[in-house]
Image (cartoon, coloured by chain):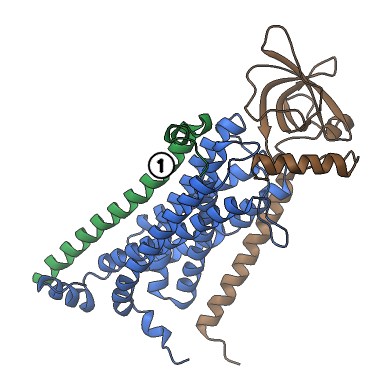
Chain colours: A blue, B green, C brown
Amino acid sequence: MNINWFKYSSPQTFYPLAGKMIPWFAWLAAILAVAGLYIGFAIAPTDFQQGEAYRIIFVHVPAAWMSMVIYIVMAGWAAIGLALNARLSAMMAQALAPTGAIFTLIALVTGSLWGKPMWGTWWVWDARLTSELILLFLYLGFIALQSSIDDPRRADRAGALLALVGVVNVPIIYFSVKWWNTLHQGSSINMGAAPKMAATMLLGMLIMALAFWMYTVAVALMRVRCIMLERERTSDWVKELSVQGIAGVKS
Amino acid sequence: MQWESWSAFFNMGGYAFYVWFSFGLTALCMVWEVIALRKRRAEALRLTQLLAQD
Amino acid sequence: MVIKARHKRFILIGIGLALVGLAAMLILNAFQSNMVFFYTPTQVDKGEVPHNTGFRIGGMVLENSLKRQDDGLTVHFSITDTAKTVPVVYKGVLPDLFKEGKGVVAQGKVGPDGIFMASEVLAKHDENYMPPEAAEALKRAQEQGSTSLVMPK
């Protein structure tokens, strides 16, 4: 393999590459979402105990999964940025945080909308719900910390530390339903065990999760391009890009 | 198909509010995020072009 | 071997993460008792529950234990973990999923007569999702197959 990865780790080469990738991921996300919604609403049967209310699962679980996955990926980029002093990695971490926060919020609110009719309450302070709320605070803390420090390099470092410390919360969220007595039910999908869901329900949920994943890549790339433009405004490559832009060349 | 009629579909077995609120909110968040990012990009491009013209 | 600055940073981050992980483990251990969302009827029986404040009991609604009082609001039922059973009285609206043989979490206090007076009753459903026909078939198979007293989790 002779691909020079370091070539793509500089913003000026990654910027156009990201621009080319966005439409692909956006279309994939749209197609998968349509397929997932069709399976979720038209093909998946009603549930034996929750009736139609269970269909909230098709947004709730994918959003909750993404909230955790994005945090791990974000912390990973932040760690690489911290260790290698790579500015693109730090920008990737920064680009992922708002999307992660939005998915966390979606998971919390849809969970609440599901809890009210099924459990009989909008909210309880059990380990699963509390740790997911802490995840939202971690995302918001990361965003706030980064934006409160003017020097981007120092902001990256401070953000990275917070992101890394917060990683411990992710396994706590995931295993909370195993480790403690919670109102939230256990996982329907476990490693090494048959899923506790009818096949079409499971399929719809997995396709929706894939759609959310593709959406995340698309918006994270959109955001990282904005961050590059904003942060490197005075650099030669952005100026070059702007000159082309003024001349009508699409970038 | 799971539904006898469109009204049965929209009614969601009596859980219409919870189900449609969940899906509506999710869609709204995603659409808002994309629009906000397009605005942010336009603004960033405008500023860089201002800088480049100087 | 020369340790590059970059490697050193990796090692430091690794150590930092390990320390944070350890700290979190310790904190979790310390808070374990406070992270309990509900107690089981067995714990209630053994007296392993808070005595002065209210707490939650979680388990199954015992089959054939649900009785409604004439006022239409007060209900009596028992919560069981198959080993022990706690009688409960509750006045209020029950959640849609509240059913005999299904999961339940009740908040309240044990009265002087040993009856748990619930101020809030929540339904705890399991992680199984299937169409009603499948659930019906499963139930039939279970009834024919075994006479075990173990309740499906």
- Residue B39 image point, x, y percent: 23, 55
Nearest the camera: A59 or A220?
Answer: A59
Whether residue A140 is visible: no
Instruction: Give the farthest residue toward the right.
Output: C147
Relative to A187, B26 lies left or right: left
Nearest the camera: B54 or A218?
Answer: A218
User: What SS does tag 1 mark?
Assistant: helix
Whether residue A245 is visible: yes
Indicate the quadrant containing the C terminus of chain B: top left, top right, bottom left or bottom right.
bottom left
Q: Residue at x 41, y 42 (%)?
A: B25
- Give the image quarter of residue A130: top right
Nearest the camera: B2 or C107?
Answer: B2
Q: Residue at x 45, y 57 (%)?
A: A212
- Residue B40 image point, x, y percent: 25, 57
Q: Residue at x 56, y 31 (%)?
A: A116
In this picture, is C15 found above or below A103? Answer: below
Residue denoted by label 1: B25
- Residue A231 image point, x, y percent: 28, 67
Relative to A85, A47 lies left or right: right
Q: How many marks are shown on the rendered structure?
A: 1
Dot 1 surroundings within 10 Å: few (below 14), some, or many (20 or more)?
Answer: some
In this picture, is B42 found above or below A234? Answer: above
Amino acid type, callout 1? Leu
Instruction: Give the farthest residue toward the top.
Output: C70
Relative to B7, C122 lies left or right: right
In this picture, is C105 found above or below A63? Answer: above
Q: Chain of mark 1?
A: B
- Residue C16 image point, x, y percent: 60, 67
In this picture, is B12 found above or below A165? Answer: above
- Give the image quarter of residue C65: top right
